Image (cartoon, rainbow, N blue to C red):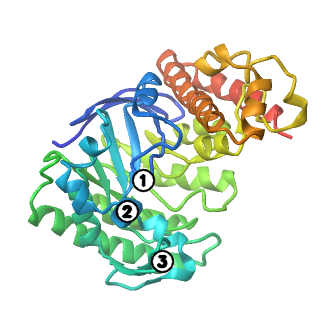
Amino acid sequence: MAIRFEIIKIDPSGARLGRLTTPHGTIDTPAFMPVGTAGTVKAMTQEALEGLNVNLLLANTYHLYLRPGHELIRRMGGLHRFMAWRGAILTDSGGFQVFSLADLRKVNDEGVRFRSHLDGSEHVLTPEKAIEIQRALGSDIGMLLDECTEYPATHERAASATRRTIAWARRSKKEIETTSASEANPEQAFFAIVQGGIHKDLRRESAAELVALDFPGYAIGGLAVGEPHEISCEIARETAACLPAEKPRYVMGVGKPEQLVDYVRCGADMMDCVLPTRNARNGYLYTNEGPLHIKNAEFMDDPRPIDEACACTVCRRYSRAYLCHLFRANEILGAILNTHHNLYFFLDIMKAIREAIAFGNLSRFSSELQARLEAGHP
């Protein structure tokens, strides 16, 4: 097996404590993956990520294909060697990024024809091409090409995308089985992505068809695209129940700190989101008393750390006043320190969630976390 997944304990809510073994290390689950879209988690060095005990991050096929190009990365020995990363890597297929290019792409049964957001050049991404690119990258886990629908999407629109995603998965399966494994990572695994919008019958249909193809793991895609959080969780829970219990489940693109435990209770083993890094660069910092905007004048002479309850190196050393100054002066160090804190905050929540599952008190932890974080929201 390219990857190995072991379930250690299951909470009454359905939350799972597990261990995912990959060619580049073992990950305790449920796990949060920092997003390193172009082969870098913005404002973080690899050493800093290792210092946060990150051992699985996400990179993006679409962006790396356009720049610097998958063939260059192949010649460099694969993405791990290219970016000097010792841990595991999951690569998204690029489907969501192409979906986001609404005015620059056209989808049909063959694949997606799109124009680069960089230079306007035209490209075609097919299920087979997505596998080829990720083979060159040599990630530990690759994702199949899917069609993500917008919210709201009619049943007819979601059904069309769901059946196209299933057809693409069959083609991807054939491509995986009939082509050479990645030289950079012969043990590479590929996950299928369940689609269906907010329509439960389509989610069940998608899951059943993809499970029959027997992939080593499954993702729940098409959430966090504008639907209410309650509906997102309802669909995640419904979909997870249709997936093999012994295989890892990845809920894509979620969520806010107070929402992480909700998705874990829906059965998610893996999650990713750009919020901690993107918001950090905009001066939006997470704390145990709710978020704060470090650029605000009230912090200009505030000697306290970002969060007095946080043990990260930023909170142990730097004041809000200094971070406010860095942000207002547009200093690079501001983005670096903000990102470090926000990532620590997310990862620390995930660690606490794992501990709560292990000790059987996830329900109490969930209530306390959400009450604490939501109370601080404006």
Give above or below for 359 relative to 164: above
Cα–Cα span, label 2 and label 3:
33 Å
Residue at (77, 29) in percent of width and height: 371
The residue carrying mark 1 is 38
The residue carrying mark 3 is 159
Helix, strand or loop under label 3: helix
Give above or below for 263 relative to 134: above
| Residue 156 visible in rendering | no
Q: Amino acid at mark 1?
A: Ala
Q: On the rendered structure, is 200 left or right of 84?
A: right
Q: Amino acid at mark 3?
A: Ala
Asked if the residues shown at circle 2 and circle 1 are in contact, with their CB atoms under 8 angstroms apart, the answer is yes
Q: Quadrant of the C terminus?
A: top right
The residue carrying mark 2 is 67
Helix, strand or loop under label 1: loop
Which mark is nearer the camera, 3 or 1? 1
Q: Quadrant of residue 25?
A: top left
Q: Position of residue 50 (x, y in %)?
A: 40, 26
